Image (spheres, helix red, strand yellow):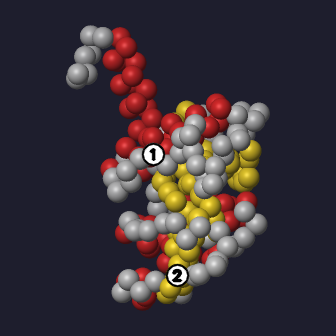
Amino acid sequence: MGFDPEEPANVRFHTKYHDRVVNGIIAPQKKADQIIWEEGLFRVSAVNSLSPFPLRFRAEVVGSCAHTDNTCKSYDFGPFAAEGMSLEKDTHAFLLHKHNRVIGIVTAQKAKYVWKCTWEQYENHQFEKLVGYPPMWGIAFAWIHRRYRGQGLTRRVIVEVAAFFATNVEFLGWQTPFTPSAKKMIKRLCPTCFYIAK
């Protein structure tokens, strides 16, 4: 079924969808928001499976919008769901807000399988699996609204994610493969070696 400009429900849906694509997802601050960083008009909130349902649903909507962005086509499904997420992975969503809009999302998961490699080893597919290494937090997904890219906002969120988990960026894991932009950013954060966590 296509878009019917004579159908009010179609018009409302199209208007709302277009607004999200152009401006980000409307998300006024809520009392229940767990704000982990704030500066000027920007703030980052944390959401997990124990958060109130409205916050989990908002994170799911943001993840769905990110997933439909054509820069994220390598992902098979949305990065966060309001219900049914694996308790073992303990997925957290970190939403980047600007005023009353959400303009980015980073998800982190507990990973059981960990590899460590230099960038040269990564390029040559020579990963060192760490046997007996304890589960670690890994960045599973990151997206910023097109309008706000190139401002270092993804890195800012990831630094705050590391602080939230009481660790340093160098000790976060990353899910592979990387998009070209993700690879460039991770090289800036971890210039010599890094962890792959799945």
Q: How many marks?
A: 2
Visible residue check, residue 24: yes
Give the quadrant of the N terminus.
Answer: top left
Front disc: 1 or 2: 2
Graded by Cα atoms within 10 Å as few (under 14), some (14 to 19) or many (20 or more), the crowding at tag 2 reads: some
Front residue of 27/61: it is: 61
The three-letter amino acid code for the residue at tag 2 is: Lys
Q: Which residue is mark 2?
A: 129
Q: Residue at x 58, y 82 (%)?
A: 130
Q: Which residue is mark 1?
A: 78
Looking at the image, residue 67 sits to the left or right of residue 35; the answer is: left
Marks 1 and 2, the one that precedes in the sequence: 1
- Which percent across, then down, holds residue 111? 59, 65
The secondary element bearing badge 1 is classed as: loop
34 vs 14, nearest the viewer: 34
Q: Nearer the viewer, residue 169 or 185?
A: 169
